[in-house]
Image: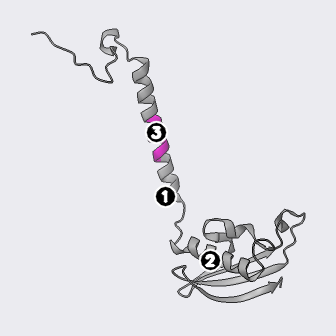
Amino acid sequence: MVSQVRETQFSDDWHQAGVPSTKLMNRLLTAATGLVLSLSGISALQAAPALPLAQPKAANLARMRAETLNGGLGSYRAAACMYETGATSCLISRSDEGFLFGFRGGPPGWEQETPPDPTLETEVLVSRDGDRILAVPYNGPIR
């Protein structure tokens, strides 16, 4: 009985040469690299603490309220921490009441000055679901 070899996308005549073809080796190397990278990315994601889903939304709402209260983006910029996902460095507390953010701000470019010279300080309390401003306990000169 004569055996027949069926052509597939991976055959590339490697069975005749006794060694895998360059094309096959490249495919295997690419697949193995992708697997390693995806698995390492998964462990890195698992290691990072998860933010509540409402926290980034609450941070954006708090920052936008401060911008509105202080004259808009043409005359005010919140601290860089308020532009980070979830504003974790500006988060004073997270409770059953909601998210309380505290941050400084000033005219555009204030953080690039040496030394940075903020002119305003703001605290904003946002609901637990991140949908509503509950209070602005402070918005004024640096205390």
| Residue pointed to by mark 1 | 46
Q: Position of residue 93 (x, y in %)?
A: 62, 81
Q: Quadrant of the C terminus?
A: bottom right
Outermost residue to the left: 1
> Could you tell which of marks 3 and 2 lies nearer the N-terminus?
3
Is 38 magenta? The answer is yes
Q: Residues within 10 Å of mark 3 (few under 14, many from 20)?
A: few
Q: Which residues are magenta?
A: 32-39
One can see residue 66 in this view: yes
Q: Are marks 1 and 3 in contact (CB under 8 Å)?
A: no
Q: Position of residue 85 (x, y in %)?
A: 61, 65
Residue 143: give its label: none
One can see residue 91 in this view: no
Q: Are marks 2 and 1 in contact (CB under 8 Å)?
A: no
| Residue pointed to by mark 2 | 61
- As rendered, which of 66 and 116 lies closer to the eye? 66
Q: Is residue 19 left or right of residue 5?
A: right
Q: Position of residue 89 (x, y in %)?
A: 68, 70
Give the residue type that dot 2 points to: Leu
Of marks 2 and 1, the one in the foreground: 2
Q: CA distance from mark 1 to mark 3?
A: 18 Å
> Could you tell which of marks 2 and 1 lies nearer the N-terminus?
1
Above or below — where is 63 with respect to 33? below
Disc 3 secondary structure class: helix
Disc 1 secondary structure class: helix
Give the residue type that dot 1 points to: Gln
Q: Residue at x 47, y 40 (%)?
A: 36
Disc 2 secondary structure class: helix
> Could you tell which of marks 1 and 3 lies nearer the N-terminus?
3
Above or below — where is 35 with respect to 60? above
| Residue pointed to by mark 3 | 34
Above or below — where is 87 with respect to 18? below
